[in-house]
C-alpha cells in the first residue's frame, strides 16, 4: 500500500468510497466533498493498493494552530490492515510539520469501533455534539495534542 496526495482524477472514487463507508445523513454529498478537498488550507491523502484507491483522509489547517480531520474513509475489506493507521499517521506528521498543537475530529456517538481506534492513537473525547449529523445523530469530538 502507498499513500499519495490527492489528484483531481481521484474525486469520483473518493466520493464512492465515502458513500460506501457511511450511511446517508453521515456521508458527504459530492459537492460537500469537493468543497472540503478544495479548501486552500486542506490536505488530502489517498491510500492506493495495486492501482486501486482503498481509502483517504481529508484534513484542514485552522486558526490557532489546530487541524481538523474532516473525514477518514477506508473500504471495509481493507480495515484492520493498517490503512487507517497510515492515513492518520500522515495527517499527524503533517500537523506536526506545520507547527500545529492539536488535531481534532468528530465521530458518531454510536461508532464505538472508530472511538477505540482514535483512543489507541491518543485521541480523547472532549465534547459531545447533539444532532451533529444531518440524520439527527450525535457525535463525539475527539482531540489529540501534537508534541
Image (tube, helix red, strand yellow):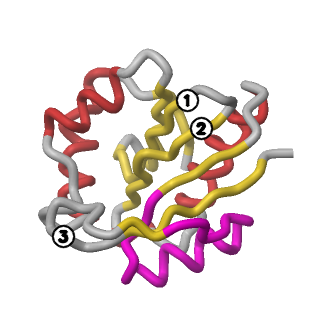
For residue 124, which quarter of the picture? Answer: bottom right
Q: Which residue was labeled with disc 1?
A: 62
For residue 7, which quarter of the picture? Answer: top left
**Residue name at image x 53 percent, y 75 percent:** 115
Q: Which residue was labeled with disc 2?
A: 67
Queried whether the magenta region covers residue 126, the answer comes back as yes
Q: State yes or no: discs 1 and 2 in contact (Cβ < 8 Å).
A: yes
Residue 11, placed above or below residue 114:
above
Queried whether the magenta region covers residue 51, the answer comes back as no
Q: Nearer the viewer, mark 3 or mark 2?
A: 3
Which numbered disc, 3 or 2, marks the residue that appears first in the sequence? Answer: 2
Of residue 51 and residue 91, the one placed in the foreground of this image is: 91
Which numbered disc, 3 or 1, marks the residue that appears first in the sequence? Answer: 1
Give x and y (percent) for residue 97. Answer: 77, 28
**Residue name at image x 24 percent, y 62 percent:** 133
Q: Which residue was labeled with disc 3?
A: 136
Determine crowd level at label 1: few under 14, some 14-19, many 20+ residues with C-alpha closer than 10 A. few
Span colored in magenta: 106-127
Amino acid at each position: 500500500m502507498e499513500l499519495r496526495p490527492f489528484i483531481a482524477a481521484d474525486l469520483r472514487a473518493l466520493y464512492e468510497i465515502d458513500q460506501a463507508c457511511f450511511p446517508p445523513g453521515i456521508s458527504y454529498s459530492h459537492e460537500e466533498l469537493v468543497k472540503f478537498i478544495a479548501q486552500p488550507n486542506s490536505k488530502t491523502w489517498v491510500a492506493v493498493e495495486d492501482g486501486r484507491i482503498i481509502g483517504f483522509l481529508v484534513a484542514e489547517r485552522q486558526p490557532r494552530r489546530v487541524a481538523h480531520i474532516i473525514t477518514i474513509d477506508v473500504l471495509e475489506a481493507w480495515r484492520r490492515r493498517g490503512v487507517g493507521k497510515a492515513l492518520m499517521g500522515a495527517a499527524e506528521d503533517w500537523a506536526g510539520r506545520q507547527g500545529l498543537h492539536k488535531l481534532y475530529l468528530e465521530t458518531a456517538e454510536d461508532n464505538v469501533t472508530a472511538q477505540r481506534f482514535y483512543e489507541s492513537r491518543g485521541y480523547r473525547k472532549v465534547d459531545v455534539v447533539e444532532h451533529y449529523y444531518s440524520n439527527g445523530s450525535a457525535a463525539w469530538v475527539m482531540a489529540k495534542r501534537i508534541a
